[in-house]
Amino acid sequence: LELKQLIYLDNAATTRPIINVDGFYREYAQNSWYNPSAMYKQAVEVERKLNDARKTLALPISAIPEYTLFTSGGTESANAAILRGFHLNGGKKQHFIVSAYEHAAVYASFQALQNMGHSVSYLSPEQDGHISEESLCSLVNEDTALVSIMHVNNETGSVNDIERLSAAVKRINKNTLFHSDGVQGYLRCPFHFQASSADYYTVSAHKVHGLKGTGAVFFKKNTPLKSLIYGGSQERGLRAGTENTFGILFFGEAVKEYTKDLEQKLEHIKTLNLSLKQKLLRLDGAYLLSPSENCAPHILNIAFEGIRAEVLLHLLEQKDIAVSTGAACSSKKKREDRIHKHLGFGTNILEGALRFSFSFENTLDEVDTVSNEVAYALTNFRKYVRR
Amino acid sequence: LELKQLIYLDNAATTRPIINVDGFYREYAQNSWYNPSAMYKQAVEVERKLNDARKTLALPISAIPEYTLFTSGGTESANAAILRGFHLNGGKKQHFIVSAYEHAAVYASFQALQNMGHSVSYLSPEQDGHISEESLCSLVNEDTALVSIMHVNNETGSVNDIERLSAAVKRINKNTLFHSDGVQGYLRCPFHFQASSADYYTVSAHKVHGLKGTGAVFFKKNTPLKSLIYGGSQERGLRAGTENTFGILFFGEAVKEYTKDLEQKLEHIKTLNLSLKQKLLRLDGAYLLSPSENCAPHILNIAFEGIRAEVLLHLLEQKDIAVSTGAACSSKKKREDRIHKHLGFGTNILEGALRFSFSFENTLDEVDTVSNEVAYALTNFRKYVRR
């Protein structure tokens, strides 16, 4: 099956692996495939390389390499931070707070806590897409074990001020732990983990041009963290199972590559986003669902009245353009409207929402093509044009 | 740091990735990196390739591809089969049976069940290293929820007859589920999963020349399986999180490569094992810890009286030979003697135990070198020679 190359504007779903693999894999298959838990020096050298990758990952957010845990991805990372041990803590019921528009990995973890008998408060974002410090603080009490607020919403791109929110929570209850899902924020929005009051920040490799199947939890010294997976004493007892050495070393290389000229990369992404936004909002019946301020550079969510997003997606696909109607992980089940319901638009508009998401690999030419093809599709296939 | 190539006889710890990556990675980075949950045809094509890998993995053990779940490795696979949902089943206490010489991934899962208040029977192997059908059956009762018996012991290579043991358990209680850790057995010892009475068979990619960070659970239709990881509905709801597509496709390729001329490969491995065994057992004070019958082709465990295994391991390392004193995953903590204590040897002998483990990539020349170097090390460094 021959498939054409796409104009790929679905970089919030996954990104293309960017490492020049010829050298990387040859080195791996030659020197770095040993079991890092083995005792000969070649194996010890692999462990050293894993620790180098920890340093590489921690540096851009000023986290501490020693408190960086590798996992099988963003979902396991979020689970580890949120659920660690709570399923064993059968007796004592605790209180949790989570924003209502989290990714399924976080949301489902809290539903699991609720099923275990814990109490969970779901906090809706404001209409502008951000979590209000005041509303959050009003929910924190002396039994609140953990708060989870995502750094960047994966559907609209709205950015939460994690430094401010985590500090506010700690002022009310210093024992309340704070987790932030950084899967869409890491590298794309500035964040200083160590200086913040957040206890956990969880990330995924394949959203920043690494490989699927690798993630990490950044955590603070003395912050409780407990593996959901039982077995050997790898990762200093925090996660059993032989390390995914190839994915971890690849993650390190991807972060090195991404952070090379990071400012320029992000400026380029912003330029692409702004350009497509301006072009698309000139079209009849187009509504901006992404926040107009404090939006992540790589996400643009726009709804088109009078056409279903799935129809538009497939029309664009015929032109070899990949976009998304929302998070890929929820694309195959009935769409939950919990993510968008705060925005104040009716279903007739929300059902026409498309997410365009950018990488530094995209070009302004691609943006031009996409905006032209959206315009063409709307002219020819929407049910009606708003006048 | 320049490191020499090793004579690598630690293939039970991990194996060298064998795929010719030039073509494989190029194809991946070109066509197969899309998120398999996305809706455009390039992404659907990735999902098709994942399902092809399921078929490739299932074929050699006659499992059903649709009932093949991908995980982050052997440890998560064992956890998923053993723990699925039991931590949520707070009220009802159940009975479990596990052999006492399981890998830490399995053993620790049962300790977790025990910590949750369930009852666990630990069954010691016979002195020849095998689990007795009679002893196993005497422990099964009407409350027995699950039995776990490993296919091949990772330290001695003893092979259990999973077909016979699982059938015997079901004859006593047809509702008792049967799990077998197939990490050391898969591809190396014949097994027909679908025809057996086992409900779960768990495997790891990196033990058969795939990559670390990928594993699978083969299970039966209508057998309960529940993810330990909450989130999206990937893997038909059985495991949340974007699939490790690179690792999974690599696993498929590795299995294709391994099963090419499988009989010849296994014959070669047996020849290597037998040759080294004969040479080493000619040495003074050498004891065979592997069973003399029903032993996996790739594992040879021999103890040398009068020298500590760690000393011998490092002497061999200086000659660029990699072997192991036991499972890599337990090498860094105090060695548990639960694995060997059934063998009927004293600590003075057991503390000199080395595991040699083979791949089809090894040669008879390597075996000659290793046996000569062991002989040299014993002659020069052991505390005394038995007369």
Image (cartoon, coloured by chain):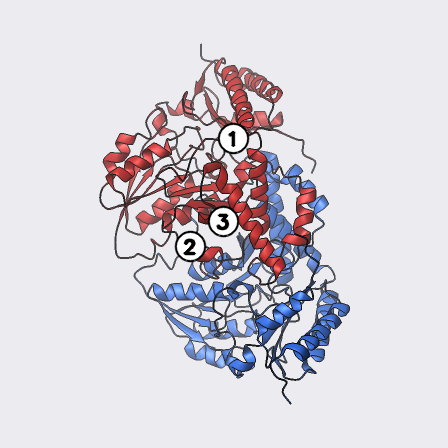
Chain colours: A red, B blue
Q: Viewed as shown, does residue B198 lie left or right of B299?
A: left
Residue bearing mark 1: A324
Image quarter (top left, top right, bottom left or bottom right) of the C terminus of chain A? top left
Q: Is residue B157 visible?
A: no
Label 2 element class: loop
What residue sits 58% from the left and 50% below the top? A49
User: Seen in the image, is B59 located left or right of residue A232?
Assistant: right
Is residue A178 in view? yes
* Residue in the picture at 45% in, 71% down: B98
Q: Of circles 3 and 1, which is in front?
A: 3
Q: What element does badge 3 sit on?
A: strand
Task: Name the residue beneath numbered marker 2.
Answer: A228
Residue at image position (67%, 52%) is A29
On residue A70, which mark appears? Answer: 3
Write the residue at 64% across / 50% down: B250
CA gap, disc 2 and disc 1 = 31 Å
Q: Are marks 3 and 1 on the same chain?
A: yes
SS state under label 1: loop
Q: Looking at the picture, which amino acid does disc 3 mark? A: Phe
Q: Amino acid at mark 2?
A: Leu
Chain letter belonging to callout 1: A
Q: CA distance from mark 3 to mark 2?
A: 13 Å
**Spatial separation of the CA atoms under disc 3 and disc 1:** 28 Å
Tell me if A248 is positioned left or right of A341 in this view: right
